Image (cartoon, rainbow, N blue to C red):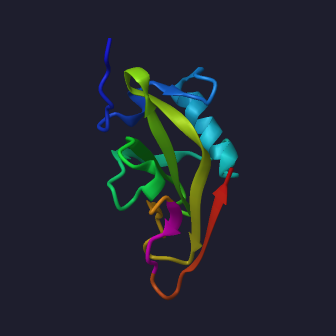
Amino acid sequence: MTRNINTVKPLSNYFVDKDNNRLTANDLLSHIKKQADIGENIQLTDIRLRKLNKEEKSPKDGLEEIYVLEAKTQDGYSSIAKTFRVRGNNRLMLENSSCKCTSSKCNNGCSAQIFGGDCMCSYCSYECKKESSITY
């Protein structure tokens, strides 16, 4: 049975770890929070899943389908981007790295983004303090 990647309900997709073990939505969110050093009791909001375009991917990725799950912490302090590669039967396999941007004193928080395969933070107004990190 072939499944389509559901970008409308991102957590309803079939996610797997590097050993091809299925991850529930809760397992996935816990893994992302742990890797990004975000407390387990902090909620992730604005969860979106989208396919990376050619410019966002690393040149070495070629035609491979890669998706990014983007989310923010409930307090708006951190933004996270986690990439997944599509594997057989439309399974989304966790990548090793996560991109996290933190900001404070911002009217609009900085957003974690993937561009050219690298982690970047979106523009923030001059009063912001921002920091980006990549974890493996």
The residue at 45%/63% (across/down) is 116
The residue at 51%/68% (across/down) is 120
Does residue 103 sit above or below 81 in this rendering? Answer: below
- Which range is magenta? 118-124
The residue at 43%/72% (across/down) is 108
Residue 43 on the magenta segment: no
Q: Nearer the viewer, residue 111 or 136?
A: 136
Q: Nearer the viewer, residue 95 or 60?
A: 60
Would residue 36 be found to the left or right of residue 111 on screen?
Answer: right
Query: Image quadrant of residue 64?
Result: top left
Percent coordinates x, y for residue 60 in the rendering:
47, 53
Residue 119 on the magenta segment: yes
Query: Image quadrant of residue 40?
Result: top right
The residue at 45%/45% (across/down) is 69
Does residue 95 sit above or below 120 in this rendering? Answer: above
Q: Nearer the viewer, residue 36 or 46?
A: 36
Does residue 52 sit above or below 132 in this rendering? Answer: above
Percent coordinates x, y for residue 73 in the rendering:
54, 54
Q: Residue furthest bottom?
A: 126
